[in-house]
Image: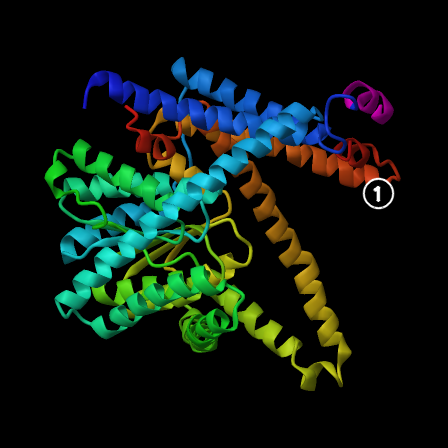
Amino acid sequence: MSRTVTYIRIYLARIIVIVGCLSILAGYFLTSPETAGLSSELQLWSSAISGFTLFIGLITIFARYIRSVMNREQNWPFHLYCLIVIILWVPFGFLQGIYSDIYQTLYLSTKITLHITIIGMMGWFVVSAMYRTFRVRSFRTAVLAILAIAMIFFNAPYLTTPYPVFGDVSYWLLNNPQMSASRAMVICGGIGGVILGIRILLGLERGALRMTGGE
Amino acid sequence: MNCIISSITGELITKGTTFQLFFLITSGILAYIAFYLARHGKTWEIRPLEGLEAIYEGIGRAAEMGRPILLLPGISTLSNAQTIAGLTVYGEVAQRSAEIGVPTHLITSSTEVVTAAEAITRDVYIRAGKPELYQPGKFVKWYGADQFVYAVGTSGHILQMKPATTIYYGYFLSDVIVTGETGSRVGSLQIGATTDQSATPLMAIVCDYQLVGEEMYAAAASITKDRNAVATLAGEDWIKLILLALMIIGTLGSLAGWNFIYQIMGV
């Protein structure tokens, strides 16, 4: 790649990022209808470009799963099923519309049922993960385990009905130590996000900018 | 005071955002001062982050075991700061592991992130002097945009590839319990980082190491070993001190029936 093209790739991408960030900030903070219009127009462009990137995902899926089916790799029948479902959804969506009965049946009988299965399985995952968490190995894990067990018991009706004070203790734990810690996390996370944005504007965020071939 | 600020900015700035804009500009100025000082030789040391050390350990572990590394930047798009931080860490981890011959995989639910991550991967292999090892679609995977489709696709990938190290770095929700538990079952060293409140406790139960809250941004800056990027963390600390002072004054003032800080923030 020639040096000129490399420079265009680096600096054009950086200019787009900076102009995009500033226009969105201006659209949010300033009352001027022109800045609001510019911001919404750029967001529209972004949505249009995002739509095109969806094809990249589809290509990735097809490339991987077709190879899996051809080579009879592990779980290839599931990959074949996935490809058939994708191929079926597209013409039905185009020809019948996504709110048609046939499309909704296809959608509900494939995606939604699988979705619900995963949510059901999460119960087992949580129990399994909790088992590991409650193996107390340090002071911090001991505090975590004691508080978790306390919260479970303090919310159990057989304890809170005869002794409402346990319910009050559980609310106090949730609304005071838990809430203050989580708000501290949210505030610090927000500041971290702002500083990351400033690093991008200053051209210091290598991760975000190396994708443009930065030095 | 409130009326004076409103009368000055009311015409120009959207109502209720004046303090936010002031805060943003102040943050920018402080970050730039820290950056300026760093460029003139000032250095800041940041405290060791266990999660960050674990990432380095995870790269070595993958090399010893001859297994890949998996990095998950979460279920959000490039418009989320957490995803950007995840990509930064991906770039650095992929760079170090590519140099020692360990492949790093990334699975995302956003097609925008696929494009960005592919560009990063290509750049990583060029820098590592091994451009022939880069193939589009080999390291960056996309199994679907839905939260649970992502979780299931990732879990399948984990079961097949058995990564030595799995790094969760970005915006997650309850899907992290599915992928995290699968990662634990294949014996992967698990490192989590998110600022999302609902995913933090879930990560705590599935990960061996965790970067909590803004530690994820601090680690993303310090992993690059870029003195200027690390300097902005000093600016971040100054902002935290200002906010802490505002909180203390605001709380004491509020107890005394004086709501000046509260009113200023609502301008």
Residue positioned most to the top: B40
> In the visual, does B237 lie left or right of B123?
right
Q: Image quarter for residue B116?
A: top left
Q: Nearer the viewer, residue B152 or B221?
A: B152
Where's the C terminus of chain A, which quadrant?
top left
Q: Residue at x 21, y 71 (%)?
A: A76
Amino acid bearing label 1:
Leu
> In the visual, does B40 lie left or right of A142?
left
Instruction: Examine the structure image and report whether residue B2 is included in the region drawn in magenta.
Output: yes
Instruction: Examine the structure image and report whether residue B3 is included in the region drawn in magenta.
Output: yes
- Image location (x, y in percent) of residue B240: 59, 34
| Chain under numbered label 1 | B
Where's the N terminus of chain A, which quadrant?
top left
| SS category of the residue bearing label 1 | helix
Name the residue that disc number 1 marks.
B255
Residue positioned most to the front: A95
> In the visual, does B94 lie left or right of B27?
left
- Image location (x, y in percent) of residue A6: 26, 22
Q: Residue at x 51, y 47 (%)?
A: B213
Tell me the magenta residue range. Answer: B1-9
